[in-house]
Amino acid sequence: MTIDHTSLLVPIEKYAEVLTWYLAALTPLGYTKIVTFGENGEVAGLSDNGQRADWWIIGIPGPNNILSSHTAFLAEGRDTVDSFYACAIAAGGTDNGAPGLRPHYHANYYAAFVKDPVGNNVEVVCHVPPI
């Protein structure tokens, strides 16, 4: 079974900042915002194909004590991992692991890790050997 979509809950006060960050950081993967809704537009659906949102950012009210999450996006090539890292850092993300091999996972596990504006760990990974 594959995952159809994932939602990321963020404090409403940080919603605009987090959405802006993901739009910049996920540009190398082709992600764009395709839908927003909610009383104040605090729900955004992002897609890498322009047809169906599979990555959702949801601003919620309440205390800023949301647990952080880890999400890994699949890249077809190592250059996309490198580009994600550059875009994510340029957009204000925090380094959590520069692009490189992680052989403790497997020989061709090439990934980069960046924390978003509210501390979620975002990874982009490529599993294929270099061409």
Image: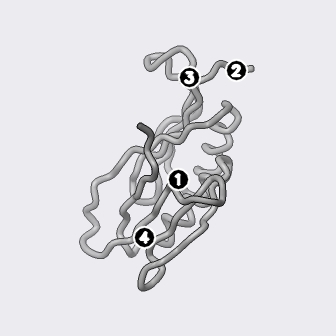
Residue 93: which disc?
Answer: 1
Q: Residue at x 56, y 71 (%)?
A: 35
Q: Residue 91: give x, y in percent of width and height.
A: 60, 58
Q: Residue at x 70, y 20 (%)?
A: 130
Q: Report the side of 7 relative to 94 (left or right).
A: left
Asked whether 71 or 16 is in front, the reply is 71
Asked whether 21 or 127 is in front, the reply is 127
- Eyeballing the image, is 101 above or below 125? above
For discs 2 and 3, the disc positioned in front in the rendered view: 2
Chain-order first, disc 4 or disc 3: 4
Give the amino acid at mark 3: Leu
Give the amino acid at mark 1: Gly
Q: Residue at x 56, y 37 (%)?
A: 74
Quarter of the image with the N terminus is: top left
Is label 4 in a helix, a strand or a loop? Answer: helix
Is label 3 in a helix, a strand or a loop? Answer: strand
Give the amino acid at mark 4: Lys
Chain-order first, disc 1 or disc 4: 4
Give the amino acid at mark 2: Pro
Q: How many marks?
A: 4
Mark 2 — residue? 130
Tell whether label 3 touches label 4 (CB within 8 Å): no
Residue 101: which disc?
Answer: 3
Chain-order first, disc 1 or disc 2: 1
Q: Residue furthest right?
A: 131
Q: Quadrant of residue 7?
A: bottom left
Mark 4 — residue? 14
Specify few, some or many for label 2: CA neighbours under 10 Å numbering under 14, 14-19, or 20 or more.
few
Specify few, some or many for label 1: CA neighbours under 10 Å numbering under 14, 14-19, or 20 or more.
many
For discs 2 and 4, the disc positioned in front in the rendered view: 2
Quarter of the image with the C terminus is: top right
Q: Residue 29: give x, y in percent of width and height.
A: 65, 47
